[in-house]
Image (cartoon, helix red, strand yellow):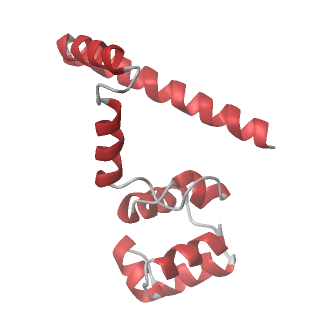
Amino acid sequence: MNERLKALRKSLNLTQKDFAEKIGIKRNTLAKYETGVISPSTAVVSLICRVFNVNEDWLRSGQGEMFLPTGDDVAEMVSNLVEESNPFYDTILDIMRSFSKLDNKSQEVICNFAEDLAKKFIEKEKKEDD
């Protein structure tokens, strides 16, 4: 992870001092992370990912892209999904209509289920890659 932290910081064109300040740590702590003397805690990794829009899988294991899709990327994906030429167009609309009719608790249950399912797919892919 130390090399990926350094690569991330350099891709953002930030000094160690600037990067560290943005996540609320000391520069010398970041230097220790980058050299592998110490590893960042789970909380620090989560903070780095949130502040810099970094893919946590990439930061931890090198899998995937460095950054998560931006709002523009997500908007483009959604736009492609709801184009009438998409063979799943009607199905997607039916799902969206049904979901919007649910109460907040039911929507939350479905979102949690989908998140758990996605995590299981990711774990399965990781096992297959090993």
Say if 110 sits above or below 52 in the image: above
Q: How many marks?
A: 0
The answer to which of 121 and 21 lies nearer the viewer is 121
| Figure quadrant of residue 65 | bottom right
Q: Residue at x 29, y 52 (%)?
A: 71
> At which x and y percent is residue 88?
39, 20
The answer to which of 8 and 112 lies nearer the viewer is 8
Q: Is residue 98 left or right of residue 33?
A: left
Q: Is residue 115 left or right of residue 86?
A: right
> At which x and y percent is residue 8?
52, 73
> At which x and y percent is residue 35?
67, 81
> At which x and y percent is residue 33?
60, 75
For this orientation, the residue located farthest to the front is: 85
Q: Is residue 48 left or right of residue 62?
A: left
| Figure quadrant of residue 47 | bottom left
The answer to which of 91 and 85 lies nearer the viewer is 85
Q: Residue at x 69, y 36 (%)?
A: 125
Q: Residue at x 26, y 19 (%)?
A: 96
Quadrant of the rendering where the N terminus is positioned: bottom right
Q: Residue at x 61, y 70 (%)?
A: 4
Say if 121 sits above or below 7 in the image: above
Quadrant of the rendering where the C terminus is positioned: top right
